[in-house]
Image (cartoon, grey):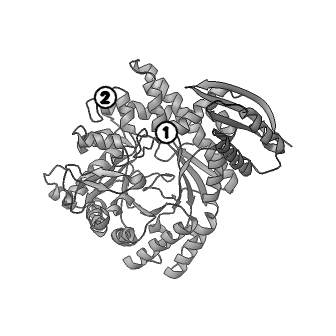
Amino acid sequence: MININEVIETNQMIEKENLDVRTVTLGISLLDCISDNIETLCSKVYDKITRTAENLVSVCREIEREYAIPIVNKRISVTPAALVGASACRSTEDWISLAKTLDRAADTVGVNFLGGFSALPAKGMTNAERQLILSIPKALACTEHVCASVNLASTKTGINMDAVSLMGQVIRDTAAQTADRDSIGCAKLVVFCNAPDDNPFMAGAFHGVSETDCVINVGVSGPGVINHAIQGVKGRDFGTLCDTVKKTAFKVTRLGQLVAMEASRRLGVPYGIVDLSLAPTPAVGDSIAEILESMGLEKTGAPGTTAALALLNDQVKKGGIMASSYVGGLSGAFIPVSEDHGMIDAVECGALTIEKLEAMTCVCSVGLDMIAVPGDTPASSISGIIADEMAIGMINQKTTAVRIIPAAGKKTGDTVFFGGLLGSAPVMKVNTFSCEDFIARGGRIPAPVHSFKN
Amino acid sequence: MAAEKSIITVVGKDQFGIIARVTMFLYENNVNVEDISQTIVGGFFNMMMIVDTSTSTISFMDLSMQLEELGKKIGVLIKLQREDIFKSMQRI
């Protein structure tokens, strides 16, 4: 029988250590909405989303109340729009009207974000994908809930450098279109290498073509819980440290598994995966940087940071995999700068740079996330940063991503404010030496050799 | 009807009649108390009850909200949670 100390421990995690379920994301296939007429497409898409997700928010609220566990976000991911709209959308205006339809549907069902305004040109880019990508700056400026993502590379196909080059400019344009709101459009746009089909987290969630008609994916959280547990083993050896993280991650993931099963049962929608990610928020006590610092680093970014993050990421997976029957998505520790007050502090005091963050992305999910850079950073330099990150993912057979904000009108040392979960970000210094000629070459970087791992 | 175990926790400053008032409320709503334990953590009174909510005359949601209200009246925090959350987190 459950005893009082176990009850107190669980409730303390929820009340004092910010334990929550970060997102319940309903994946919806829109493949059966395809039409060659834009009005028909939009009307089918709106109906399918609002019908399928009708009870998502109310069911999540019931679960929150019955278990007394916050579910911070209720979200939707849909089939990449490039596949759904290829036949109907003949201009960027058509793509924008599809984005507006997605936004309206998200608004109707009461979710805060809907992901899937996406294209997957990892090897080659169709004309439809190009049009969609070109429509992203305006689509994100005139919608509130829609998130866009573009998969630019994979371990199997290599890196589509034409698409990387295009995205550098599109990110700049997205920043310019939302210049009056600190370039917030860029916070809703992410580029990937090896994008997963079942990611419940924004901005990169989409419902991949390997998925069934609709599915529930859950993203857990709990940096505060892990941090609290680590503080209890101060000065102890790495074996003890790892064991502590693993056991705590087990408990956190079991909570996610429970919520996923309940949401699935009550909505009559199959359960897909639990994403084991440690996702921070701007709140004090909900930070990945704090965890690394509790391990013994003076500041995140100090020598040893990559090792500490590698350890954390691996133990979270080891504990989490034991706790859940199906694990997927991005599963690892997120290191967004703007959404983590410890990361912001580390940047502001000079301990953490983009280069160190890049090294850290080699050992964690997902990549360079929510990083503000000067507004005058050339498009080619943004493409260069993306190419570096794509290369890390491609060679290491992992998912990597870039969500970068060239904040219009801002310089190194300024701050951009997005509010809410997106937080605020110090504008970070970018290496000013040019990579323009490298990016201008065009074409593809071939897939890597899968042997001789050195 | 299959038992539907839930956990009620009461946290706050110790005072006369907390258990009496909570159990009276449960009695009025036909909820059976199966176990009670209590402890003091950081100077605060912590009580846990294992109850069977399957026989309740009102819905789980109403039970949960009315217990919260009762807590406010007494000046303590009362929470009703389904037992699964503790079982899944604390047991392999």
Q: Secondary structure at mark 2?
A: loop
Determine the chain carrying the residue at label 1. Answer: A
- Look at the numbered disc 1 and give the secondary structure of its residue: loop
Label 2 Cα crowd, 10 Å radius (few <14 / some 14-19 / many 20+):
some
Q: Residue at left 41%, top 18%?
A: A236
Q: Which residue is mark 1?
A: A222
Tell me the subunit letter for badge 2: A
Residue B63 locus on image (x, y percent): 74, 47
Question: What residue is shown at x 55% (from left), y 26% (from top)?
Answer: B42
| Residue at which label 2 appears | A297
Say which residue appears at 39% left-offset and 38% top-offset. Answer: A288
State the image coordinates of residue A378 (x, y, percent, origin top left).
Answer: 19, 60
Q: Answer yes or no: is residue A321 visible.
A: no
State yes or no: discs 1 and 2 in contact (Cβ < 8 Å). Answer: no
Same chain shared by disc 1 and disc 2: yes
Q: Decide: is A182 above or below A354.
A: below
- Label 1 and label 2: CA atoms lie apart by 20 Å
Residue type at mark 2? Leu
Q: Earlier in the sequence, mark 1 or mark 2?
A: 1
Quarter holding the N terminus of chain A? top right
